Amino acid sequence: MWTVNEARVNALVGDGLVLDVGGWTNPWPRADYVIDLLPYETRTLAHDLSFDISKGELLHHQKPGERFSKRTWIVHDICGDQPWPFPDKTFDFIVCSQMLEDVRDPIRACAEMIRVGKAGYIETPSRLMEHVRGIERAGMAGYCHHRWLVELEGSTLSFRHKPHFLHTRSRYYVPLRHLQQVSEQRRYNCLFWTDTFSHREVLGYEFYSEAEAFVRALGIARADYLSSAAIDAYRQVRARLLRRRVAEDRRWNDLFALSQSIIDSERSLVSSRSSR
């Protein structure tokens, strides 16, 4: 959603003083300051394969278009017990995109954003995305490094502990096929705020029943689960073959044929049940 909302963010920012919070892998070039746990020289290298990190190659120079610099890249634990090193309401605008779901204390980070900023934009994956099985790798739900299920209601961000069992049973996860029917707006939480916004951690121990109720409320068709199960099985087999470096054409052709037969049989089963 950032690509959709960036124009609006630019219009709101104007020539104001901007802080990017936790933008290490992909800092916003327009930001005047960046605050992150990791240093300036390592920014973007997670995805930039032109650098050989094993040889100690780092990004020392300022890239074209970057408004921030080494001087304004602040290395700081944004969830630590020390306040961010800025006076109250220093920044005209704060950008925090695809970060809060990763960190150990998003409540602390939100409080500091409100303290040092006058307005801002926050983006996270929606809770639905974290329930999707196979979105990152076969057999797993959501993104492996995310700690929180994030929901946006009005101007309130809610953070709920992401349990470990979401991938285990269909009552807890969303099939990958269902994602094709989900709009871009439902895949992400996008919050524009001015002065302040509400944020909270949702506590509770009814993890299983709560997760089941969330998925049930989505009204997902059974056919989506059957098709996704066949695709998931194919992906797991394919991943095992790739790990073993098996590339014989006949074996691959047999695998594809088997996968297609599974998908066809599942579709036939769904069709026969629906016609009864």
Image (spheres, helix red, strand yellow):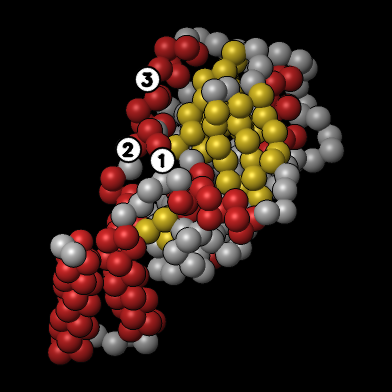
- Quarter that holds the N terminus: top left
Residue 124, above or below 199:
below
Number of labelled discs? 3
Residue holding disc 1: 187
Question: Which type of secondary structure does the marked residue at label 1 adopt?
Answer: helix
Kind of residue sitting beneath label 2: Ser
Question: Is residue 201 at all visible to an observer of this figure?
Answer: yes
Up/down of 175 relative to 157, above or below:
below
**Which residue position is annotated with label 3?**
7
Which tag, 3 or 1, sits closer to the chain's start?
3
Distance of mark 3 from mark 1, alpha carbons? 19 Å
Q: Which amino acid type corresponds to the residue marked 3 in the rendered image?
A: Ala
Measure the C-alpha gap from mark 2 to mark 1: 7 Å
Label 2 sits on a secondary structure element that is loop
Q: Is residue 256 left or right of residue 61?
A: left
- The foreground one among 211 and 140 is 211
Q: Are marks 2 and 1 in contact (CB under 8 Å)?
A: yes
Q: Position of residue 10 (x, y in %)?
A: 43, 17
Q: Nearer the viewer, residue 117 or 225?
A: 225
- Give the label, 3 or 1, closer to the camera: 1
Q: Nearer the viewer, mark 2 or mark 3?
A: 2
